[in-house]
Image (spheres, rainbow, N blue to C red):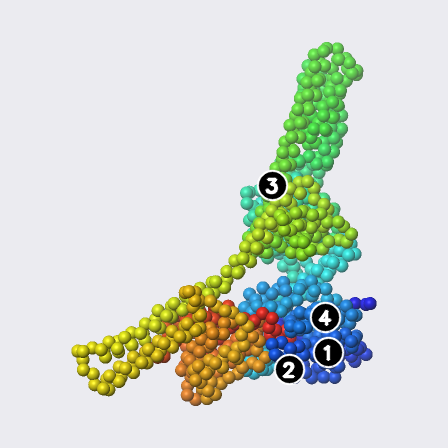
Amino acid sequence: MRRGRLRVFLGAAPGVGKTYTMLEEGRRLREEGGDVVVAVVETHGRCGTAAMAEGVEAVPRTTVSHRGVGLAEMDLDAVLARRPGTALVDEYAHTNAPGARHEKRWEDVSALLAAGIDVITTVNIQHIESLNDVVQRITGVPQRETVPDQVLRAADQIELVDLAPQALRDRLAAGNVYPAERIDAALSNYFRLGNLTALRELALLWLADEVDSALKDYRAEHRIDSTWEARERVVVALTGGPEGETLLRRGARIAARSSGGELLAVHVSSQEGLREGRPGALAAQRALTEKLGGTFHQVVGDGIPESLVGFARAVNATQLVIGISRRGRLATALTGPGIGATVIRESGGIDVHIVNHAAAGGRFALPRPGGALTARRRLLGFALSVLGGPVLTWLLAGQRSAESIVVEVLAYQLLVIVVALVGGIWPALYTAVLSAVTLDYFFIEPVRTITVDEPVHLLALVLYVVNASLVSYIVDQAARRSRSALRAGAESELLATVAGSVLRGQDALQALVDRTREAFGLDAVRLRSGEDVLCASGQPRGGEEPALVRVGDRASLELHGAGPGASERRLLGVIAAQIDAALEHQDLSDTASEVGPLAENDQVRSALLSAVSHDLRRPLTAATTAVSSLRSSEVSWSPADRDELLATAEESLTTLTGLVTDLLDVSRIQAGALVVSLAATDVDEVILPSLDELDLGPADVDLDLDPDLPCVRADAGLLQRAIVNILANAVRFSPGDRSARVATSVFGDTVQIRVIDHGGGVPPDRREQLFVPFQRLGDTDNTTGLGLGLSLSKGFVEGMGGGLSAEDTPGGGLTMVISLPVADGQASGRTDR
């Protein structure tokens, strides 16, 4: 059976027109003869959206009962039975009511796709799982309804429904998104201009990355190695030398010439790597890369040109910036054109920029004698021996005399040493034997024969070969040690890069996996714990068997691509130990998060102690003074004075009794510990008892309560105490002709309770003092100054994981806003549209 196609309309925020666009597309398909039905659409009372839904067949919803309340959900079975060509399913990230077949609506959509039904759906950027924490930092609103990235990326088509931030605010102000009573709160919270601009940028970048990922997959599937210049990607090759800063700034300028250009700096650590430069130069260049907006990468490879070009092709680079060689002309003449020429030859369609710099090679610099002996070096040594020997013989033969034998021997000895420096032990031994035979044949009597008359001459030749062998052996051993040292340095740099990625704030596990893939040139790396993939980097090619590296007792690294060698295995073991430490740190962080409720309890308890120290003192002092005065025998009280003192004592004791009762009832103090009991709480069931406690009626307070408000995660007793205190203040300071107002609303996964008065307000510079213990206006009498106070109310709300803030009331006055998280499992349904 053909699997259905999924088409997603993505928006940066509620109200940009995703649902309207989906319905518009459904009507277009229907007019073209398609079989289209509305499986579920949330109009949210918007007339334009409701009008667009008219005329399109709608499958009736099913009702799911939850806690005695009937919730309308998409009838999956009915849609499957209807089997339309295309189903319109709004709010892809929606959480279904308990009792439905699937927990999430995207799982319902998967069932429709499996049945061969095409689906058009909508989703907001804040509901993408990988961006959830980013959106929370931008808006301050956590999102518990999310869609896994891999599910969304599997869609056949993703389209962005875009609207400029100011245009969206204009729509909101005109009443086209929310009802009139919720507009002010929305504009001052989620729909701030900065929030909308950041969310829009996030949506555009995510979609651009998705398109780029799709392009990479297409090129990998079709084995396309050539560069497609869809986006300028500039790779800058760094050696750690002094020219690095010049190259980086040149690369940044090239990347900035086109919109969306990317800067990538790469350092190839190899056994030959040109690793000169000041200590710490590479670290400084890494910091400069990040300052210029680029990313730093580390690659381990035997050949710098091949590794550099391979990395550039892997990231689909369009430009490659390298520095002109720091070698001198003599070194270039002896050892070939060098890295730059090889990079140009291997780069293919990648443009290569060779940048001049102050550290370019001098006129007469000698080649470096050290370094690992590659096959190229050995071949060069043999070539020098084959060509240098005849040339030297020709030169010496023309100047031969009876006394020149010492010069001839030393000249051939020099040739052997030079060959040893260039090619190592085997070319040097070859040259030593060949030069010994040449000396005997051309320069030792009798000439033109391989015969030695004097035994001492034969001994001299043997010593000559031994000396040449020893020199070449020492050179070869030095090269091997240099190779090991460079390899250790490359490994150290790789580990430093990995550690730096973690320290700079990247996710530890993901950074380790990403750098492992880049460093060893692998197709993909996955960190598995049993059947679960904890994190992954890259895409594996089909048909290959991955290599496994154990990570402690809990996980393993799955390596796709060329298998690591013995030295790489040792380095992978070190990285695996770091991953194991990161997993342990993650476990400790999870444990630490469980201590959070204890901190909340301490916060509330501190607020209680601060309040009790003052609130108990005044009524207790007043009552004590009144009773002491009545018992005094030195003063004769008149009946009126006695009645006044008794009234004062009664009033103070009554206040004191009520305060102590409230504290014991609200805080449920047991054995000196205050416990916050968080549970799903209906806000309406807390507000109404608060009004009864204050003896307030319709003439005193206007109520604007959202009938669809979800439950909040709160302690009902603490929340009532906070509302009572805040509402009492609002009623006290409201003018006689205007009542205080209580309004509720929801934004994302946050419920707001707004207590509004139209009094004189509080100057902005004094608002912070509102929450300092006992900073009351007119706190002079014996009753109104007691309560739990705004300081304690703030402590209660924050102890429940919420927040209390003060805002200006439009037209004058003060608005106190209590923000609380939506209870787990409660679908707000307010931001996905």
Q: CA distance from mark 2 to mark 1?
A: 17 Å
Label 4, on which residue? Answer: 109
Separation of marks 4 and 3 at Cα, in angstroms: 52 Å
**Which circle's residue, 4 or 2, is located before the other in the chain?**
2
Q: Quadrant of the N terminus?
A: bottom right
Q: Nearer the viewer, mark 3 or mark 2?
A: 2
Tell me the quarter of the picture where residue 270 sits. top right
Instruction: Estimate how packed mark 1 is, as few (under 14), some (14 to 19) or many (20 or more) residues with alpha carbons within 10 Å.
Output: many
Q: Hey, what amino acid is under mark 2?
A: Arg
Q: Amino acid at mark 3?
A: Gly
Residue plotted at (66% across, 30% down): 476
User: Which mark lies nearer to you, 4 or 3?
Assistant: 4
- Which residue appears at 38% of the width and 77% of the height? 658
Can residue 687 be seen?
yes
Q: Which residue is mark 3?
A: 489
In primary-sequence order, the first of circles 4 and 1 is 1
Q: How many marks?
A: 4
Say above or below: 254 vs 366. Answer: below
Of pointers 3 and 1, the one earlier in the residue sequence: 1
Which residue in the structure is indicated by mark 2? Answer: 46
Looking at the image, can residue 344 be seen? no
Secondary structure state at the residue bearing disc 4 = helix
Residue 385 percent coordinates (x, y): 73, 28
Q: Which of pointers 4 and 3 lies earlier in the amino acid sequence?
A: 4
Across and down, in percent, residue 382 comes to 74, 30
Image x and y of residue 242, in percent? 58, 45
The answer to whether mark 2 and mark 1 are in CB contact below 8 A is: no
